[in-house]
Amino acid sequence: MKKIVYLIISLAFLTVSCTEKFEFDFDSNAQVLVVDGVLTDQGVDHYIRLTKSKNTLVNADFSGSSNSASQFEAIKDAIITISDDVGNTEVLSYIGIREDDYRQIEGYYKIENIRGVVGRTYTLKIEWSGKLYQSVSILKAVPEIEQVTFKDKYLEAKEETVTIPLLHFTEPQNTNDYYLLHYRVNGWTGSDRNWEYSIISDKYLTEQVSGLEIDDGQSASGRDFYGEIPLGAEVEVFMESLTEESYEFYKGIIVFFST
């Protein structure tokens, strides 16, 4: 099982001069900066992808497939700076295509030196098209996953029974926390599932959480959330920390696509 501290740096941005609220106006031809990236406390490569928004949802989905991801025009000329509150600063280099991305899509900038440390405050600045965008967030800890168990669950929509993972952990009661939950089977999230994540606020959780289903939070994936877990498969369960702004952004997207 995995416990990863994530700082989602993609979803809530403020311009330096004022708050800029993004509305889903598909009649508008205006192109909006779209930022996709995370910073974690794990020893893995970290990236930020910049693209331009589109005023259409043709072929759009949440699967991260090459069909959906390659629709959007990459931004190659931005200046991205990330820094922390102990004096570390890095200007990111544009690399185009990630080394590990089989989809071969462009728009990636690589974080070479900055790493996530729980409790530190991180500032992301992006200069592009004459505007300066800035986001400031604290990398918060997530509860230790104490146990992962499994049970069989009958999915009425799919008319089949699948094995699903259940989380057990102790939820801090003195802070307001937001989580993103998902799992991976044999290194894959499942190509037949759309946006196989769920989000949840700790206001819906008791101190002792026993047997939380991964999809108990809000999700846009609906009936296709769970995939088959073959006998003997390696299952990784991820519990990731979200900022409140990221949580509200995800929730807005979920509500939009659920109506």
Image (spheres, rainbow, N blue to C red):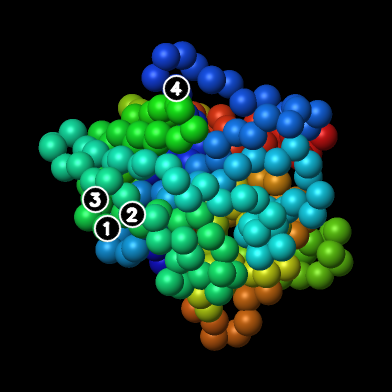
- Disc 4 versus disc 3: nearer the observer: 4
Q: CA distance from mark 1 to mark 3?
A: 6 Å
Quadrant in the picture for residue 199: top right
Say whether marks 1 and 3 touch (CB < 8 Å): yes
Which three-letter amino acid code belongs to the residue tagged 3? Ile
Q: Is residue 94 left or right of residue 120?
A: right
Is 5 on the left or on the right of 150, as rendered? left
Could you tell me which secondary element the residue under label 1 belongs to?
loop
Percent across and percent down for residue 116 are 27, 49
Q: Are marks 4 and 3 in contact (CB under 8 Å)?
A: no
Instruction: Give the amino acid type for the residue marked by disc 2 in the picture.
Output: Ser
Q: Nearer the viewer, residue 132 or 203?
A: 132
Mark earlier in primary sequence (4, 3): 4
Q: Which residue is under mark 3?
A: 114
Q: Which residue is mark 4?
A: 15
Question: Which residue ends up furthest to the left in the rendered image?
Answer: 87
* Distance from the alpha carbon under mark 4 to that under mark 3: 23 Å
* Residue density around tag 2, few if under 14, some if 14–19, many if 20 or more, within 10 Å: some
